[in-house]
Image (cartoon, rainbow, N blue to C red):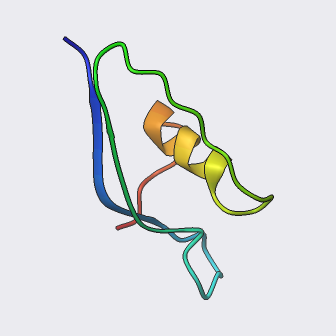
Amino acid sequence: MASISLQHIYKTYPGATEPTVKDFNLDIADKEFIIFVGPSGCGKSTTLRMIAGLEEITG
């Protein structure tokens, strides 16, 4: 059974004063379907890139 669990995830880009992703938690169970919805710039793509291993989690 596969699952994904993220606890208290942060991502701050170099030179930024505020984190792009701040204290994010996520649990996805096996065969569960989810979507990310939110305004532009809220960290959806960054979060997906961290899950895929394309972005380093900074905290």
- Residue furthest toward the right? 40
Q: Farthest residue in the left direction?
A: 1
Q: In the drawing, does residue 8 fall left or right of residue 16?
A: left
Image position of 17 with respect to 44: above or below: below
For the C terminus, the image quarter is bottom left
Position of residue 22 relative to residue 28, above or below, is below
**Residue at 59% across, 34% down:** 35
Where residue 31 sits: x, y (%)? 36, 13
Height in image: 26 above or below 7? above
Residue 58 x/y as whole percent = 41, 64
Residue at position x 48%, y 44% in the image: 50
Q: Quadrant of residue 23?
A: bottom left
**Quarter location, residue 28:** top left
Question: Going 70% across and 54% down the picture, which residue do you hit?
Answer: 38
Q: Where is residue 51 in the image (x, y as percent from the top left)?
A: 45, 37
Q: Quadrant of residue 57?
A: bottom left
Q: In this view, does 30 lie above or below 34?
A: above
State the residue in front, 38 or 18: 38
Which of the image's four quarters has the N terminus? top left
Q: Nearer the viewer, residue 32 or 48?
A: 32
Q: How many marks?
A: 0
Q: Which residue is drawn at 65% across and 81% down?
A: 15
